[in-house]
Amino acid sequence: MSAEDKAEAPSSASPPPSSYFIGKKDEIIEAGRVTKLVNNREVLVLHHDGVFHAMDMRCYHSGGILFYGDIEEFNGRLCIVCPWHKYKITLAEGEGLYQSVDPKEKPPKPRWRSKGVKQRIHRAIEVDDDIFVEFNDTPGPIESDVYQTESFRARARAKLEKPPVNTTKK
């Protein structure tokens, strides 16, 4: 799914029946990003360079809170950088990126590579002045799914971790 597919053009049509209301477009743009617990899933919706993006709020690697992650470009691809361990996740596809060198190459030159899809990316939909999320229901597990379980949330509560659910950030 490309960045252009992330936010649909405004329309007066109704949102898809399987989508969930996140908030008012202007409020999300002003905040920059918001999180919501929707259908028992923690979702991060962010607005960057005129495009809305949606994904699971917790990083696939170790459950870091992506709400606090910076948006950076790596090899021409926009990524959110997990604040815990600096893992790079593409906003468009949810791929984990890493840098590697080929020791046979002289001189060795670092190159960006993909680990494949690691983070569940959802579709942000703009309808009139509202933003909705349509969940990615790709069959099979994606690594970030493990942090969307009630057992993980119970462990997080036991550690007194407080994620910024239903919050905004400027």
Image: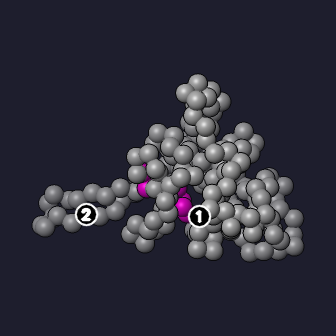
Does residue 137 sit above or below 170 in this rendering?
above
Q: Is residue 46 left or right of residue 91?
A: right
- Kindly tell me whether residue 54 is visible in this rendering: no
- Residue denoted by label 1: 1
Q: Secondary structure at mark 1?
A: loop
Q: Secondary structure at mark 2?
A: loop
Quadrant containing the N terminus in the rendered view: bottom right
Q: Residue at x 74, y 64 (%)?
A: 27
Rendering coords of residue 71 (x, y %): 50, 63
Residue kind at label 1, given as amino acid type:
Met
Residue kind at label 2, given as amino acid type:
Pro
Dot label at residue 110: 2
Does residue 2 sit above or below 139 in this rendering?
below
Say if mark 2 contacts mark 1, CB within 8 Å: no
In terms of sequence position, does the residue under pointer 2 or pointer 1 come before the other? 1
Q: Is residue 131 left or right of residue 69?
A: right
Colour setup of the view: one colour
Decide whether residue 88 is among the magenta residues.
Answer: yes
- Kindly tell me whether residue 63 is visible in this rendering: yes
Q: Residue at x 55, y 63 (%)?
A: 92
Residue segment shown in magenta: 87-96
For marks 2 and 1, give the CA distance.
26 Å
Q: Residue furthest front?
A: 170
Q: Specify the quadrant of the image occupied by residue 101.
A: bottom left
Structural crowding at the residue carrying mark 1, measured as other residues with C-alpha within 10 Å and reported as few (<14), some (14–19) or many (≥20): few
Question: Between tags 2 and 1, which lies in front?
Answer: 2
